[in-house]
Image (cartoon, helix red, strand yellow):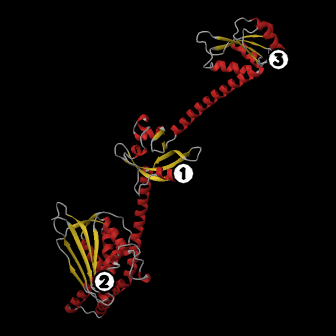
Amino acid sequence: MTLGNTGKKKLSIGIVGGGKRCETILEMFQRQTPPKVNASVVIVADANSESPGYKYAGELGIETTTDLEAFAERQDLDFILDLAGSKDALIRLLVRKGSRVPVLDAVSSNLFYDVFNIQKELINTRRSLRQTKAFLERVINSIQEEILVIDTEFKIVDANDAAIKAAGLSKEQVLGKYCYQVSHQSEIPCNSKDHPCPMQDVLSTGTHSQVIHKHYKSDGEVRYYELIHYPLKDENGKVAQVIEIGRDISDELEKRVARRAKELKEDYARLVQEDRMISLGKLMSSVVHEINNPLSGIISLSKLILRNLEEEATDEKSLETMKQHLSLVVSETSRTSKIVSNLLSFSRQVKVEVQDVDMNEVIHRVFSIVGHKAKLQNIPVHFELDKALPAVKGNSAQLEQSIMNIVFNAIEAMPDGGKLTISTRRDDTEKHEVVVEIQDTGPGISQKNLPYIFEPFFSTKGEAKGVGLGLSVVYGIIRDHQGNITVKSEVGKGARFTIKLPAFESETRH
């Protein structure tokens, strides 16, 4: 009789020997009946009723016996497994059962047991793999980073929940698609120099790759991702698949940019103030003379008035003279006060407030401070100011600093004298711009240096005369006022700086 599946008849198996091997076989029958065998264990015999297989059979409700004779009396057995290995017992059993029932001796039964044991281990392995897979899926799906598994043809073979959610598609819609179709809404792989494909890099080098990529969402939104690609290699060391781990850093980049912008703004504010103080230091030498002159006049006039009073000169002519002297004292004192006031205003670190600014007034304030320096260097200043000039929106102190820097540079460029022309005008009505031009007759700027004139730390004066921040600060101030500044110059023909600022005219200003 064979052990094949008879289709209708269920084979009854008897086991002699209730040891550990018997227990294993019973466990296998409990878990899964062999697919090719329609059979079940109906009786277990063992002289030791404490053996593990014997006791387990009793727990399962299978008949157990310690009497081999009683075992042999069973007429329904179709197959007998000898797991005890007792030759005498097997001979008696064979004599009693005859040739009607197939019997596997201990050696054959051990082979039968080994097959069952292998199947048991296979089932346990499969169960362990299913548990491991389920655990890994839970772990991977709990990760916030987007994870894709991509084959060498760039097709997505697996994706975690975060990647599925980010794609805005179902898992069925993502799997099988090319990675660039999902990440870039494109039909071709990334291949530009500024946007290289990390997949190609991993496939060609066999090592991991890390890049920052722009990803395009299905709604057209652009997001920035930090991507890390790791190769999964086969037993031959070839890349079989690639794991892509992506982290959306768009919000983080935005915060970084905002933080950096704030830092740059603070640095720029400090730079403007430092430049102002540098200019103030230059002013002091010329302003000393500007203040000393009216003070000397005030002292002289005061002495004359005091002498007249001491001499008791009270005639009408003397009183008129003293009146004139006092008027001059008031005038010179006011001029000195104005110079000092302008100096204090220029040196103060003011809060950046936007207001209506008259550029003509800005120019007058600048020359109330630097005018004397121009006179000392024999530089006449010619003003061509448009009296109907519209206002500009901006910060008066910063615009004053810009004009001051350019004028100072012009005066320093003409140590042996020259001519300085300051003009203002309204540009054509379509552009609505206020134009300020400052032109000197100094040595000019070479065509080689002209493109770099507004760059930070660029200077043609030499280390002893400055660090080259003045014009870069001017450029920044004018740009912050939505204007622009240009320069035209030829060697030996001076330089002309042109500032253009948006004009502002309120409804009540005409």
Using residue 27 as the reference point, say whether residue 232 is left or right of it: left
Is residue 66 visible in the rendered image? The answer is no
Image point (20%, 76%), residue name: 385
Q: Label 3 near label 2: C-beta < 8 Å?
A: no
| Place of residue 392 in the rendered image (x, y in percent of width and height, measured from the top left) | 24, 66
Mark 2 residue type: Gly
* Mark in front: 2 vs 1: 1
Which residue position holds label 2?
444
Q: Quadrant of residue 26?
A: top right
Q: Mark 3 is on which residue type?
A: Ser
Q: What is the three-letter code of the residue carrying label 1?
A: Gly
* 152 with respect to 397 (left or right): right
* Residue in view at x 66 percent, y 21 percent: 28
Element assignment for label 1 = loop
Circles 2 and 1: CB atoms closer than 8 Å: no
Mark 1, residue position? 206
Q: Earlier in the sequence, mark 2 or mark 1?
A: 1
Return the residue at label 3. Answer: 86
* Vertical comparison of 93 with 157: above or below: above
Measured Cα–Cα span from mark 2 to mark 3 = 120 Å
Task: Look at 60% across and 32% down and name the residue there.
Answer: 129
Mark 1 vs mark 3, foreground winner is 3
Q: CA distance from mark 1 to mark 3?
A: 61 Å
